[in-house]
Image: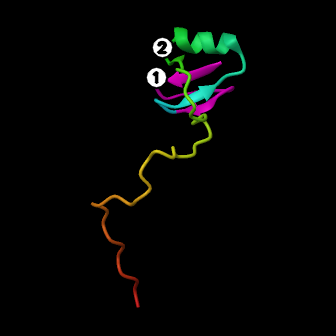
Amino acid sequence: MKLEALDNFYTDETKQVLAGQTFTVESPETGKDLIKAGLAQEAEETEEEDTNTGEPSATKATAAPQNKAKAAPANK
C-alpha cells in the first residue's frame, strides 16, 4: 500500500518517515492504522519513486544556496 506521510513518525515497519514522503507498507492493516491515526493518506498514483530511500528528489535544486557563508581560512 502506497502512502504519503502527513507528519513525521516512526514505526517498526516503516522506520523514520518524514512529512511529505511517499512510502510503501506491506501490511494493509498498518496502512489503515496510519490513515486512521492521521499520520498518512493514500498516495496519488504518480511516476515518482518512493522517497523512503532518503535520496533527494531529482527535481530539487542541486546548487549550493546563495546565502551560504564561506568556510573559515585554514590555520597555518
Which residue was labeled with disc 1?
6
In the displayed structure, 8 sits above or below 26; it is below
Quarter of the image for the C terminus: give it.
Answer: bottom left
Q: Report the amino acid beneath label 1.
A: Leu
- Tag 2: Cα neighbours inside 10 Å, few (<14), some, or many (≥20)? few
Which residue matches tag 2?
38
Identify the residue shown where x is 57% and y is 36%.
51
Say which element carries label 1: loop
Q: Position of residue 4 (x, y in %)?
A: 52, 24
- In this view, which residue lies farthest toward the left? 67
Q: Nearer the viewer, residue 1 or 70?
A: 1
Corner quadrant of residue 27: top right
Residue drawn at (46%, 45%), measured in percent from left and top? 59
Q: Are marks 1 and 2 in contact (CB under 8 Å)?
A: yes
Quarter of the figure with the N terminus: top right
Total marks placed: 2
Residue 66 vs 1, above or below: the answer is below
Residue 16 placement (x, y as % from top left): 58, 34
Determine whether, in the image, residue 54 is placed left or right of residue 20: right
Residues drawn in magenta: 1-17
